[in-house]
Image (cartoon, rainbow, N blue to C red):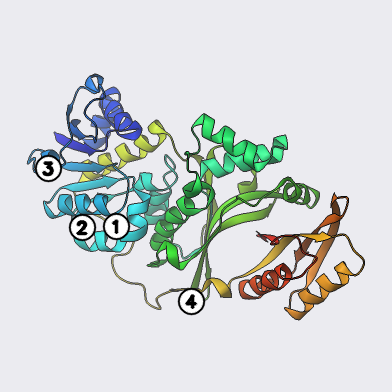
Amino acid sequence: MIKVGIIGVGTVGASVINILKENADVISARAGVDIVAKSGVVKNLNKDRSSLGIKITDNVDDILNDSEIDIVVELMGGVEEAFEVVKRALKSGKAVVTANKALLAYHRYELQEIAKDIAFEYEASVAGGIPIINALRDGLSANHIESIRGIMNGTCNYMLTKMTNDGVAYDEILKEAQKLGYAEADPTFDVGGFDTAHKLLILASIAYGIDAKPEDILIEGIQNISQEDISFAKEFGYAIKLLGIAKKDGNKVELRVHACLIKKEEMIAKIDGVMNGISVVGDKVGETLYYGAGAGGNATASAVVANIIDIARSGKSRPMLGFDKPMEGKLTLKAPADIESKYYLRINVSDKIGVLARITKIFEENSISIESILQRQSSHDSANLLISTHKAYEYDIQNLISSLEKLEFVNFRPVMIRIV
């Protein structure tokens, strides 16, 4: 019998316990051994959890020092405290399963070194119930990964879908998402792109062996997107999605998170609502697409339990981040300023003679070629210029925005969305 201790018995932790009980027959058949949850750790003992049918404590030592516990499931969240707990579990010889993307975004390589031959699994850390970790480590292991593009945050995808389909303003749909429980009271982690960035860094380590931190990559959210941008996207056949993008370019890998204009006919552009979807392109297999629930108690717990079953089957570790040895010709991170893309800009200007000529001149001075331009009246004395560009460097587009922002007839900082 395999005994499991769960540190963090919230929504996901409770779902893990219930799945282990309710699906015990199929889990035992697939694992070749019975698996039971023995005990769980919570911060607050006042809440009644008697229905779970396991020992509940507020002391992690009750799990970490329990010789009967074979697998520790870390669902406490956070970074540094969780890191210390997981380190202790691994050093005591216990296998670990985690759903903690923030922990892995900062400490995945340290944990790989500590774990060595001890099983450490983390499928639920990216895209909830979608088995993208196993797909990259196992199913696509014969491929050089050319690119990864993912909708990995259901909150942002829900908001952008409603803005597109129902014409709802950003502030209004954010309040609705908070009311429905999709967004936190402080939604910055989701709408600012940081949640997606943590997940992207994990996938990039498996695909490319890249050791980067969130501070090293380009991260932007969806806070500045308006109905004017949605209208432009529709007119030119695009959908707007928040994507995490990893892309190999020679011996460099670019990692970025931001809103994107994507052609509507692409499969990933059709993923709406709270669902997640990740496109992976391998040099031999071509494009594969993974779709499903990216959050929620049962979906995330499903991935956690799948990892527990994997460990129970073999009892051995596999390369945590996908590589038994470093690749020859090691890939390095491309500087954000060197990334190339097409761009869309919304520039709100005073409606005066000569403004358009001045704007186009500044584009020319920054070596950026305009592909299309529309003018939409914003008020009786101002207009929005909606401009798309040919390919340009991130460095040049940021200089352009800084130059435009200083002009006396530009009313506020231009809004920019990259075109994928």
The residue wearing badge 4 is: 251
Q: Amino acid at mark 2?
A: Ala
Q: Circles 1 and 2: CB distance less than 8 Å?
A: yes
Q: Residue 217, position in %: x, y?
A: 48, 66
Mark 4 vs mark 1, CA separation in Å = 23 Å
Residue 320 tag number: 1
* Three-letter code for the amino acid on which mark 4 is drawn: Asn
* Residues packed near mark 3 inside 10 Å, few (<14), some (14 to 19) or many (20 plus): few
- Compared to residue 249, the image places residue 149 above or below, namely above
Q: Report how far apart the C-alphas of labels 3 and 1 lie in the structure.
A: 25 Å
Sequence order check: which comes first, mark 4 or mark 1?
A: 4
Report the residue at 26% width, 24% height from top.
47
Q: Which residue is located at x 37 percent, y 47 percent?
A: 125
**Secondary element at image label 2:** helix
Mark sitting earlier along the chain (3/2): 3
Q: Is residue 259 visible?
A: yes
Say whether disc 1 or disc 2 marks the residue closer to the N-terminus. Answer: 2
